[in-house]
Amino acid sequence: MKEDLLQKAYDPDTFREVGKQLVDELSEYLKETLSGSGQVLNYQDPQEQLDLWKKALSGDTPGLETGNILKHITRVHHPRYMGHQVAPPLPVASLMALLGGFLNNGMAVYEMGMAPTAMERVVTDWLCHKLGYGTSSRGILTSGGTLANLTALLSARRNTALEDVWNQGYSGGLAILVSEAAHYCVDRAARIMGLGEDGVLKVPVLEDFSMDTSKLPGIYQAARQKGLTPFALVGSAPCTATGSYDNLEALADFAGENNLWFHVDGAHGGPAVLSEKYKFLVEGIQRADSVVIDGHKMMGMPVITTALLFSDGATSYNTFSQEAEYLLADTVEEDWSNGAKRTFECTKLTSSLSWYAVLTHYGETIFEEYLDRQYDLARTFADLIRERAHWEVACEPQSNILCFRWVPLGMPSARLDKINENIRKKALEEGRFYIVQTRLKGTIYLRTSLMNPFTDKDHLSELLTYLETLGKANLADEEALTETEIP
Ligand SMILES: *Cc1c(COP(=O)(O)O)cnc(C)c1O
């Protein structure tokens, strides 16, 4: 009977038992994975996984047992996990995500999440302070860097463009300036806003993949002559593929001279503001009108935890408001506690719990320690690569992201691409390490983001030796296939 089923589903004793078991299993997983034993992943193709979980639903095969899920995921806690820019979350932050999912406060209005709303204010005020923003700054937490960048650009258009697109619709002619190496979501955001391809003015990059700011005036002038009105300039701190930081001071100067909204996409490396050693990379960030920082990248948060910070809080209130009633609705007080007025989402995650918990447990130094360690490690890795014959880096690492490739002698470039692609493919299938690949100016590179605080120099040496073995095996296979062509 239905009622019995609901009784059973909400039974507190069952919850206690299952919950304790889950935490026990995850603790064992953490111990084993952090120690570096086992694979990072056991790769299966999507169809195989689909068949498996279809079958499991029918109850014929193992299903939702934790152990069975753990067999079919990528272990970000593993020191040989070096792939995408996702943090091995700090365990206390993960517990807060569990708590948030359990309490399910919706956050759109204050009383649907009183504590997390106040914590969000504490956390975003702290981040604003760390950016070097003044007291009129204000931030929000939202669901991911992608949505945060879109929100920032909507604010930019609302606050700098002469047209009132939000109320009157778009009649064309607006544009943004952004580096060609920026994350694809900036381009996507602009297209969602109706700017189209012409509305995204891509600025070329230098050898180190940072924006070539000397090109800004020419691109800007050419756009004006075509009848376009640029309204925002986006800096990457850093860009995703190579982790290279744009020169934010130069961007801030240009934005100031031309009345552009200056937005910094610091999704990955914005937290460098917390590091004495590396804050030089983000010099000028305090001059940005808005900044995005992903918690789930360099701040040890579970997915998905993102801060969007405004140097002038008032500019964040009119982004989604139909009328200009933003700041002083019925009272003289600023309405910071009703989150949905300023976020794209209505209901959203109580992600401030995780951030607040980490600050409470370990203080802000944990973020600095983590970032310094990972950024240092990328420099060590670049040295290791240079010490080996037939390896090269795409550019010097500025963050904890590094692109590199194997370059055996006497190979034409198309063949090098193929070999490096095969190396990455084989590595994925074997699952001993997890790395990714990217294409930079037409060339295929292997790519690592050193996210795990337990990855060390030995793992990186081992990685290079391993990849070289895969490369040589690949060459041997090719030679066996085309024996007659080999001199
Ligand atoms: C990861 C990343 C994004 C996208 O953020 P999500 O949280 O994945 O939506 C945007 N910009 C940069 C520079 C990034 O590294």
Image (spheres, rainbow, N blue to C red):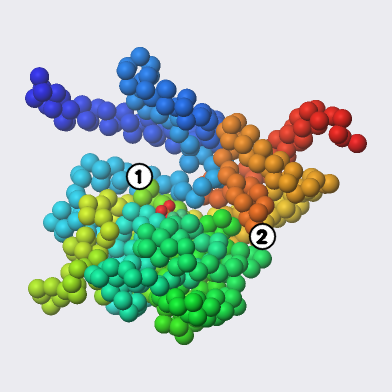
Circle on res. 6: none
Q: Alpha-carbon distance for marks 2 and 1? A: 34 Å
Binning the other alpha carbons within 10 Å of mark 1 as few (below 14), some (14 to 19) or many (20 upward) gives some
The residue that label 1 is drawn on is: 94
Q: Nearer the viewer, residue 139 or 126?
A: 139
Quadrant (top left/top right/bottom left/bottom right) for the C terminus? top right
Residue 372 is situated, as x and y percent measured from the top left of the image, at 53, 60
Any part of residue 174 in sight: yes
Q: Which residue reaches farthest right?
A: 487
Q: Which residue reaches farthest top?
A: 60
Q: Secondary structure at mark 2?
A: loop
- Ligand 1 closer than 8 Å to the CB at disc 1? no
In the visual, does 361 lie left or right of 434?
left
Any part of residue 270 in sight: no
Q: Amino acid at mark 1?
A: Ser
Q: Secondary structure at mark 1?
A: helix
Residue 392 is situated, as x and y percent measured from the top left of the image, at 72, 53
Q: Nearer the viewer, residue 42 or 487?
A: 487
Q: Residue at the spot x=41%, y=82% of the render?
A: 259
In the visual, does 316 lie left or right of 439?
left
Ligand 1 quadrant? Answer: bottom left
Binning the other alpha carbons within 10 Å of mark 2 as few (below 14), some (14 to 19) or many (20 upward) gives some
Q: Which residue reaches farthest bottom?
A: 257
Residue 415 is situated, as x and y percent measured from the top left of the image, at 74, 43
Q: Residue at the spot x=31%, y=59% of the render?
A: 141
Quadrant (top left/top right/bottom left/bottom right) for the N terminus? top left
Q: Nearer the viewer, mark 2 or mark 1?
A: 2
Q: Amino acid at mark 2?
A: Cys
The residue that label 2 is drawn on is: 395
